[in-house]
Image: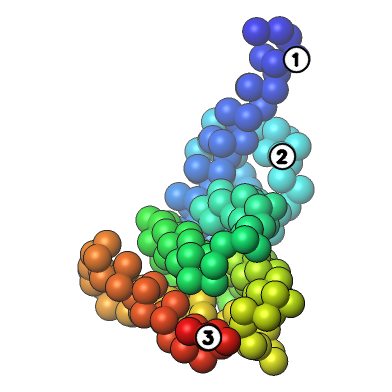
Amino acid sequence: MGLEQYRAEVSRQKQEAILNAALTAFLEFGYDRTTIDYVAQKAEVSTATLYKHFSSKADLFGGITAQVWRTDHISSTPVSSSLSPQAALIQIGQEYAQLLMSPNIQPLFRVIIAEASRFPELGTELYHRGKEPFLKRLHAYLETQVVLDKLVIADIPLASRQFLGMINDIIFWPRFLIMNLEIGESEIENVIINAVETFLARYAKSW
């Protein structure tokens, strides 16, 4: 490993340590009571080093959100227009459900809801990192299918929200409101299939 590679790896490890320490702190103390100094101490880095990676506490929270949601590939990987609407919607639904079932999603939502009145930017950050990439990806695919005359949709943004909402409403929110509620893989798959069938019953030209 060359010197530059070594430095890059050390920098990556420090950033990962900072994000892990910050996530633990935010979930334990909330956004307002978590300090940069505390996160730096727990990550075993200097405050100056932390600021080299994240310019502010808000930027640090954005980094955590990106780490938890990990939707960069969603934004950069369009769904092939050659996929049938049924296959494409199942794929998108499965990826969205997988994200909603991630271990730290619910605790992070609780922090944001608790702090939303004082720090509304947290909710905005979560939306941009989490749901928006899926909405954009679904929107782009639906546009191609309308052009191909396979779907008839007058309001694509609304249709996109309807589809993800059918999944979100059953997989995420009950688990958010009812502690220790478990949803099995077969139930998740059933939710996705029913969402796809409902969506296509409304918008497919010959479903």
Question: Given the image, on which type of amino acid does mark 2 rest?
Answer: His
Q: Position of residue 135 (x, y in %)?
A: 63, 72
Q: Residue at x 76, y 48 (%)?
A: 55
Residue occupying image coordinates x 74% and y 77%: 147
Which residue corresponds to the image point at 65% horizontal and 8% vertical from the top-left?
Answer: 1
**Image x and y of residue 56, in percent:** 73, 52
- Local secondary structure at mark 3: loop
- Would you place residue 159 above or below residue 30 in this image? below
Q: Which residue is mark 1?
A: 4
C-alpha span from label 1 to label 2: 17 Å
Q: Nearer the viewer, mark 1 or mark 2?
A: 1
Q: Disc 3 to disc 2, how far (Cα)? A: 52 Å
The residue singled out by tag 3 in the image is 206
Q: CA distance from mark 1 to mark 3?
A: 58 Å
Judging by the rendered image, the residue that carries numbered circle 2 is 53
Where residue 5 sits, quadrant-wise, is top right
Secondary structure of the residue carrying numbered label 2: helix
